[in-house]
Amino acid sequence: MTGFFYHPDFLLHDTGPGHPERSQRLIAITEALKAERARGNVPLRPDFAPATLEQLSRVHDLNYLEFLAKTQKKDFFALDPDTIGCSKSWEVARLAAGAVIQAVEEVGKGNLKNAFCAIRPPGHHALRDRAMGFCFLNNIAIAAAHLIEEHSYARILIVDWDAHHGNGTQHIFYSDPKVFYFSLHQYPFYPGTGAASETGDGVGKGVTLNIPLAAGSGDEEFFRAIKEKLLPAAQDFKPQFILISAGFDAHQADPLTGLNVTEKGFEEATQVVKEFAEKECEGRLVSVLEGGYDLKALADSLILHLKVLSED
């Protein structure tokens, strides 16, 4: 089955009034799942532990983690103009990272065929030593490092289709030949990285592939990049595990971006990546929520994403 990793404590991360990355995002997702009766084929997985300091320190500096731990003493705080938290945020962020670790564990062991992690705060902008763009801990990078360190995986593919480039994930693995980072994003746009010329460094040269899309690009451009750019590169890399940074803010209704992708575009992209995972790495696939700030567009896109993941 497809696992759905969620915990109500994710709602405790309070970003304040008017912030786009708010608890209502997960409420919209869980309510949509109930309405669709989709949970029959997508079992809820609420039992996971917060990531440990050892697990986090594989991708984040200890000084940064210690700094985040001290934020528990503050009612509200801002790590940058966009990244807001409260006294609960550190523990919620650790729990979110722990959810993704548990998801890759269960999929890797064959207990689940694949999984989706409905978590917050998101992660792909978080750098080794600082928060950025709503992100505290780089959840998907932490899970990839766990697979490498604990289970000796040598080839992990990260597919990032959030409308914003995942600069944190790219930076963490830019010189690492074990992680292929593919990003499809609006450009030029926040955070200013993700040019096609950014392809990796040193022994990691060639295992970063950025596909910048112009504002106004829609399903056709989005799907073409997945099929014509991602698939050939992934076939050459031969991944043993696939992780998706599943942002849904490329949707045409999203208030923060300028792409015109529809739910159908996300559905087709999910189908292609899932079929590739089944062919190349025994279906080992874990998808992790990143952006998506129009509540209806997020919920509608996510329902189709989950339906594809859970189909036989």
Image (tube, rainbow, N blue to C red):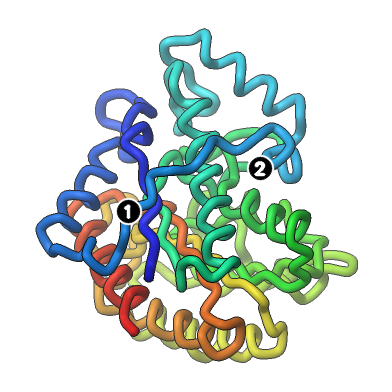
Q: Position of residue 290 (x, y in %)?
A: 43, 52
Does residue 112 lie above or below 131 as drawn?
Answer: below
Residue labelled with disc 1: 44
- When the figure is inspected, residue 303 is found, relative to residue 312, above or below; the finding is above
Which of the image's four quarters has the C terminus?
bottom left
The residue lying furthest to the left in this view is: 35
Residue drawn at 36 percent across, 46 percent down: 6
When asked about the image quadrant of residue 304, the answer is: bottom left
Q: Which amino acid type corresponds to the residue marked 1 in the rendered image?
A: Leu
Where does the N terminus fall, quadrant-wise? Answer: bottom left
Q: Which mark is residue 127?
A: 2
Observer able to see residue 262: no
| Circle 1 Cα neighbour tier, 10 Å, few/some/many (<14 / 14–19 / ≥20) | some
Residue nearest the viewer, comparing 120 with 183: 120
Horizontal and vertical percent position of residue 188: 51, 60
Q: Position of residue 167 (x, y in %)?
A: 62, 53
50 left or right of 66? left
